[in-house]
Amino acid sequence: MNQVHQLTSKLRLLDFPVEIVIDILGRLNVYDLVRARRVSNYIRQIIDSSSELLYSIDLEYFNAIPVPPTPGSDIPTLHKSLLQSESAWQRAEYSQRHPINILYSPNMHRWSCSVMGFPVESQQQIVFLQPQLEDRHSNTMSLREWNCKLDSPSVISHYNFSVAEDLVILLVRAPSRERYAYDVIFRSLSENKVHPEVAFSSVKALDDEVDSESFNPFTPISSIFGDYYGVLFRKVNKVNGGIADFLQIWNWKSKDTFQCLEVFDPTCKTMNFSFLTNDKILVVNAKELLLYSLIHSSHSLQLTAKFALPALHSSFEYSCIGFSPIPSHACTHNQLIALSMDISGESLAENPCFTSYVERNTLLELESTYTSHYGQANENSPNLPWSSWGPTHTRSFEESSFDPCKHSVFGFRSASLVGDQNSERPLCIRDFNPHRVVNFKAGNEQEGIKGL
């Protein structure tokens, strides 16, 4: 027994077979794995000989979301595909595709994960189109087409969909004299039927909250993030008089009909909202960003931080602010948020437009900064001045025209269209990842997680 103990006590990591060493190294987080490559040439060779370890490093290096292996695709194949994709991005290599004529009006169209949606036939159904490559040699494209149609002749007032969740959500005006505003209908994106995971095929929006006789709100703004669906209703006539903005959120898979309702003063000019995580929501109005926590026990939202937008001269104002939505399958990865801002004023011939980029993790970290300065946030508490967070944590660019839908953001990259909507528009690609890669390659975790 003593001989065994003496033998095992003298064993070092490098005395184990390579397979065991790789298994041990594979249990390290990626930053420690990068540091381990600097320990010795032998460990570096072991790491560099493992497709699994190199793939995990490069996934973090490029802030990429791992693709689940499919039949016929192993880790070396996925790693090679990742490197090829990143090389194409860095060199701006794109294949010329033959244009496809779309016969539907672009009014109320939506785009998500290569799928486009168009309301048709007096907005009683949604047609979905997905471009597909027919011939790799000629780059010929075709369109896969299918539709989502209501069982009743109701008119669709608003819709949204998520490819990741295979979900289509329709807002249909409630029948006259009802005390609620909309029926919210949940259907499958791939099949024209009720979604199989939905708790209820439909729920009521703004139940007992609105004056149905004079109900005529602005176009709703909606967002889908995992199990949650939220809608911002602006300038709604309340049942007891007055006007308010409402943000209503549902867990569409929950059997206990989880929902919460937040009411905003319309004088604040609430303009948009976005899910940051499953329990963090960002709301923007004409002067600030508001960060909320979703409190499950009370089915409510709790204000946790307030961040000021850049101050404008008294004769100017933010007339419209739009978000780039965060894909729900990116919930565990850091992500850029594109904040498109349109400024109006009496003396302006053309309204200036800007896009500011900020990391999601930065906003979540600044929540504790706000609390340490001002304590628990409330409607009357001050906001964190732009000078205290904006110049350090954002990057801003002037745009030629306001178009909140033209930005497509994924990870640390942004692709946007340049120019007026009525002309041919070149593509502008911004890649913010190299600012973080330099420190990450050095194995410095603290520097690697800093802002842009």
Image (spheres, grey):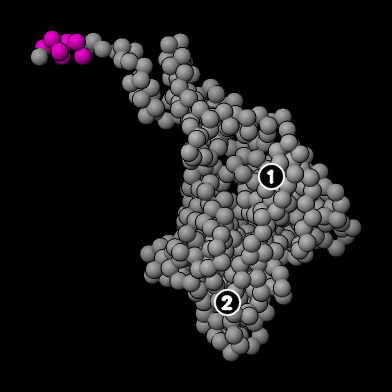
Residue placed at 85% from the left, 49% from the top?
A: 424
Residue 90 sits in quarter: top right
Residue placed at 52% from the left, 56% from the top?
A: 165
Tell me the magenta residue range.
2-8
Q: Which residue is mark 1?
A: 133
Q: Secondary structure at mark 1?
A: strand
Q: CA distance from mark 2 to mark 1?
A: 33 Å
Q: How many marks?
A: 2
Tell whether 9 sits left or right of 277.
left
Q: Amino acid at mark 2?
A: Asp
x, y percentage for residue 264? 58, 69
Along the line of sight, the residue nearer the viewer: 249 or 119: 119
Residue placed at 60% from the left, 29% from the top?
A: 83
Q: Is residue 119 visible?
A: yes
Q: Which residue is mark 2?
A: 151
Magenta stretch, overall SS = helix
Tell whether 201 sits left or right of 327.
left
Q: Quadrant of the C terminus?
A: top right
Residue placed at 45% from the left, 71% from the top?
A: 200
Q: Amino acid at mark 1?
A: Leu
x, y percentage for residue 360? 56, 46
